[in-house]
Image (cartoon, rainbow, N blue to C red):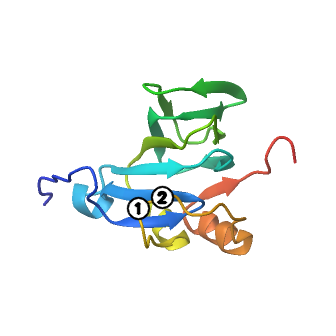
Amino acid sequence: MTQPITLLAEEGRAIWSLNHLITFKATGAETGGAFALMEHLGVPGTGAPPHVHHGEDEFFFVLEGEANFLFDGKPIAAKPGTFLFLPRDIEHGFEVVGAIPCRMLVGFTPAGLENFFAEMGVPAPSRTPPAPAPPDMEKLLALAAKFNYEVHPPPHA
């Protein structure tokens, strides 16, 4: 049985995962698997390479900053207030651009993929984005397979 969730701005478990500060606002364990919601904060130059989820839909709502998304081959310049719904089985990715960090809400339905980020990341020692660093590709690809999605090379690679 699910219970109500109330979290203030700085509340929720925080991790550093794939160059972002991720704060879990609702997990599948808390929503009966219906959805998961996370707050992502990343600095310019960080993001997610093109990838395809096979088990869940994903949605983004940009709160601050800017990110360039690639959605099924179509570029989308996302500014504050932009909402994107990305159905499963469609390639997508993004890069944070501009002069300031990008803060956005990221959700999945059904829940489950939030566990990928939890396993890929480490507890955040502060509520700031981590210093950008290349991901552990072996771990990333193993977890991607575990969570039923594919990571593709960036278009310029």
Residue situated in front as seen by the camera: 148 or 41: 41
Residue at the outermost front position = 99
Labels in figure, total = 2
Q: Residue at x 38, y 51 (%)?
A: 38
Residue at the outermost right position = 157
Instruction: Residue type at mark 1: give it.
Output: Arg
Is residue 39 shown left or right of residue 69?
A: left
Q: CA distance from mark 2 to mark 1?
A: 7 Å
Q: Residue at x 69, y 65 (%)?
A: 133
Residue situated in front as seen by the camera: 33 or 95: 95
| Label 2 sits on residue | 21
Instruction: Residue type at mark 2: give it.
Output: Leu
Is residue 82 shown left or right of residue 91?
A: left
Are dots 2 and 1 in contact, CB under 8 Å?
Answer: yes
Residue situated in front as seen by the camera: 12 or 30: 12
Q: Earlier in the sequence, mark 2 or mark 1?
A: 2
Displayed quadrant of residue 18: bottom right
Is 48 rendered above or below residue 22? above
Q: Percent position (x, y) of residue 75? A: 69, 26
Residue 113 seen by the camera: no
Q: Percent position (x, y) of residue 48? A: 64, 49
Is residue 156 shown left or right of residue 11?
A: right
Q: Which mark is residue 107?
A: none
Q: Percent position (x, y) of residue 150? A: 67, 55
| Label 1 sits on residue | 127
Q: Residue at x 49, y 30 (%)?
A: 84
Element type at mark 2: strand
